[in-house]
Image (cartoon, rainbow, N blue to C red):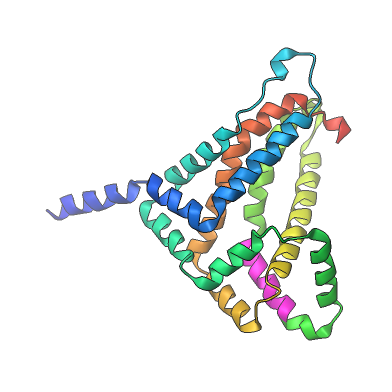
Amino acid sequence: MKKLLLLITITYNLFGASPQQVEEYLLLSNSEEVLLEIESGFSQMQNSFSQSKDESQNQTYDMQLLSLRFKDYIERNLSEDEMSEIIEHYKNVLFLQYTSAVNSDEYDQNQSSIYLAKLEQNEEYKERLELLDKLNKLLNNKEHIAIMYDDLLRPMMEKSQGGDKLDDKYFKKGKDDYLKSAIAETRRMTIYATRDFSIEELEELIEFAKRPSVDLEVKVMLSAISYALKDFFLSMSSRYDVSKH
């Protein structure tokens, strides 16, 4: 009987997240809207590439596949228990407020740069910046951000026109530049999005962000986006000329 119970437990833990859980997550986390924005943005990118004389290279990628692949990845890479724990994140009012603020349409890169400069030039905000840097590292760490370069950008460039001439030195510099830019942007977004949060709220948010399940959510969601976009990026490689970028 003990062996049977152990087998049942092991088998249960192998089950992935249910479609219902994934849909609930998309609704709570605002990921559905983010996916739609990604579909729209990359659809425009696809149309902006100059059309090739080779008709076989003019085929368009079905953007609706992005959402399907995103959901499929989550279902296969998170267990029901893990997905349940991640869904619980959005029952934390402070974390929900943070997520909403980061995804807000009000974000403006110029305004965020001005706000950041104001904080960096005033010693009064030193503590606030230190807390925000801690928060940004927890929610946007370098290893997770690198997933997008390793899984999307590098494979596309390797298969693009002139990609066979690129070496590891080129890709190392490209990855370093990408990480530097992405980390700076996520830092600016985090600082601007939390401009109305108190010091106490930031401290509470940092403690919440230390949860392993929060790190798991960030890693899996970025991996899911990369998985969803990979075929699209590869489909664009034949129209991408490295020498022009």
User: Where is 97 relative to 16, above or below?
Assistant: below
50 with respect to 77 (left or right): right
Does residue 64 show up magenta in the picture? no
x%, y% of residue 236? 71, 29
Q: Residue at x 85, y 71 (%)?
A: 117
Does residue 130 show up magenta in the picture? yes
Q: Could you tell me how many numbered marks the image carries?
A: 0
x%, y% of residue 30? 55, 55
User: Where is 78 relative to 190, above or below?
Assistant: above
| Quarter of the figure with residue 81 | bottom left
Which residue is more in the foreground, 109 or 218?
A: 109
Q: Residue at x 61, y 83 (%)?
A: 200
Looking at the magenta stretch, what is its main secondary structure? helix
x%, y% of residue 76? 43, 43
Q: Which residues are magenta?
A: 128-140
| Quarter of the figure with residue 183 | bottom right
